């Protein structure tokens, strides 16, 4: 399934598209939480519940030909960019029919057919790769834009500044999307940076950096659309910092609000900033919301059930497949 380009949609259609994507992400990850205790998922999981608006808003603004690079917390962007749900669940199960043939697991999702080149478990590792892809697009005179996703922890990596500096020098068509959920595993931004506004950090390098509400899907869509337009017109890279919230522990299906590194008000703030509730508040002003929302949830649940059933029935990789895809064939 190709992810269409929605920048020309009416606000009403756009809002329903955003709502559907966010619901699909959350309901899929809630299903993962349900399955995880069974040990059928043989992979660490990093949930993006609470951060759905960033994935939905960013990916909806992209064309199917635009490429994105993600992190180990990649379920959201995989779904929002149009990745096949059956292949995703199969990958979590370690099955042959998975998007990475059962070899990558949750942290290495990919769907190149819709523009998700891949996700990486190594913090910041795909930032230079995405930057190189943007250079390739420029050299080939392609119209595509590259989007690099990463968390606030990746900004601590030296390769981030090297990549950004190169992108500025070469005026590359890339948008750097920082999902700032306030924590790099257990470390707060203020414990790692004297300047807590990460968007301001890059301004000294000459890059346009902007901070936005990452829990407001229409805001994410609008600001990402503007950044893409700039990059596609050859006006250089953009850095977008979206402030959002991670509801679950860094890795795993549980919550960790009781831990000392959390601020006492985190749970309350997360509930108040629920991106899906914010979207529902907008949509409830329109006639027929309840009926349409109920139908939508049933459709998504059916799609998830089919995907899980597909994963359950799919075969595990053969022993011989261990030797496949180890290297590229020379030509």
Image (cartoon, rainbow, N blue to C red):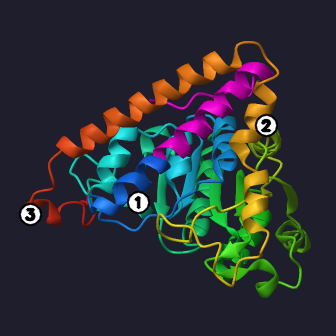
Residue at 43% of width from left, 45% of height from top? Answer: 111
Is residue 41 rendered to the left or right of residue 58?
A: left
- Residue appearing at x 73%, y 54% in the figure: 271
The answer to whether residue 255 is left or right of residue 303 is right
Q: How would you classify the magenta stretch by its main secondary structure?
A: helix
Q: Residues within 10 Å of mark 3 (few under 14, many from 20)?
A: few
Disc on res. 218: 2
- The picture quadrant where one finds residue 22 is top right
Asked whether residue 20 is in view, the answer is: yes
Residue 304 position, x and y percent, is 40, 36
Give the quarter of the figure containing the N terminus: top left
Is residue 104 in sight in this rendering? no
Look at the numbered disc 1 and give the secondary structure of its residue: helix
Tell me the distance, in whole angstroms, between the alpha carbons under discs 2 and 3: 47 Å
Label 1: few (<14), some or many (≥20) within 10 Å? many
- Determine if the magenta segment contains residue 186: no
Describe residue 104's horizontal placement relative to residue 131 as left or right.
left
Q: How many marks?
A: 3
Residue identified by numbered label 3: 319
Mark 3 lies on a secondary structure that is helix
Give the mark, 2 or 3, whose residue is nearer the N terminus: 2
Cα gap from disc 2 to disc 1, whole angstroms: 28 Å
Q: Which residues are magenta?
A: 1-28
Q: Specify the quadrant of the image occupied by residue 248.
A: bottom right
**x then y, percent, for residue 10:** 78, 19
Read off the residue under disc 1. 106
Pointer 2 with pointer 1, Cβ within 8 A: no
Disc number lying in front (1 or 3):
1
Where on the picture, by quarter, is residue 321?
bottom left
Looking at the rendering, in which quadrant would you find the C terminus?
Answer: bottom left
Q: Is residue 16 magenta?
A: yes
């Amino acid at each position: 399934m190709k992810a269409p380009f929605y920048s020309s949609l009416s606000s009403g259609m756009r809002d329903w598209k955003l709502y559907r994507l966010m619901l699909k992400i959350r309901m899929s990850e809630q299903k993962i939480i349900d399955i995880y205790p069974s040990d059928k998922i043989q992979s660490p999981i990093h949930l993006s519940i609470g951060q759905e608006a960033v994935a939905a808003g960013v990916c909806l603004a992209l064309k199917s030909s635009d490429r994105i690079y993600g992190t180990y917390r990649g379920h959201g962007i995989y779904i929002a960019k149009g990745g096949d749900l059956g292949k995703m669940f199969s990958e979590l199960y370690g099955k042959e029919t998975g998007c990475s043939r059962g070899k990558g697991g949750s942290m290495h999702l990919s769907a190149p057919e819709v523009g998700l080149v891949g996700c990486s478990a190594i913090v910041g590792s795909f930032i230079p790769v995405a930057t190189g892809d943007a250079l390739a697009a420029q050299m080939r005179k392609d119209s595509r834009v590259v989007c690099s996703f990463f968390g606030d922890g990746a900004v601590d990596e030296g390769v981030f500044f090297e990549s950004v500096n190169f992108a500025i020098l070469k005026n590359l068509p890339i948008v750097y999307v920082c999902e700032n959920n306030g924590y790099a595993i257990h470390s707060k931004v203020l414990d790692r940076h004297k300047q807590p506004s990460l968007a301001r950090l890059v301004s000294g390098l000459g890059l346009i950096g902007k901070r936005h509400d990452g829990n407001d899907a229409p805001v994410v869509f609008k600001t990402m659309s503007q950044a893409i337009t700039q990059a596609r017109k050859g006006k250089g890279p953009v850095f977008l910092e979206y402030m959002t919230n991670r509801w679950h522990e860094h890795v795993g299906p549980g919550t960790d609000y009781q831990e000392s590194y959390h601020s006492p008000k985190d749970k309350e703030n997360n509930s108040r900033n629920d991106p899906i509730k914010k979207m529902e508040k907008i949509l409830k002003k329109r006639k027929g919301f309840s009926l349409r929302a109920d139908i939508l949830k049933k459709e998504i649940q059916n799609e998830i059930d089919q995907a899980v059933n597909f994963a359950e029935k799919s075969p595990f990789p053969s022993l011989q497949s261990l030797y496949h895809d180890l290297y590229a064939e020379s030509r």
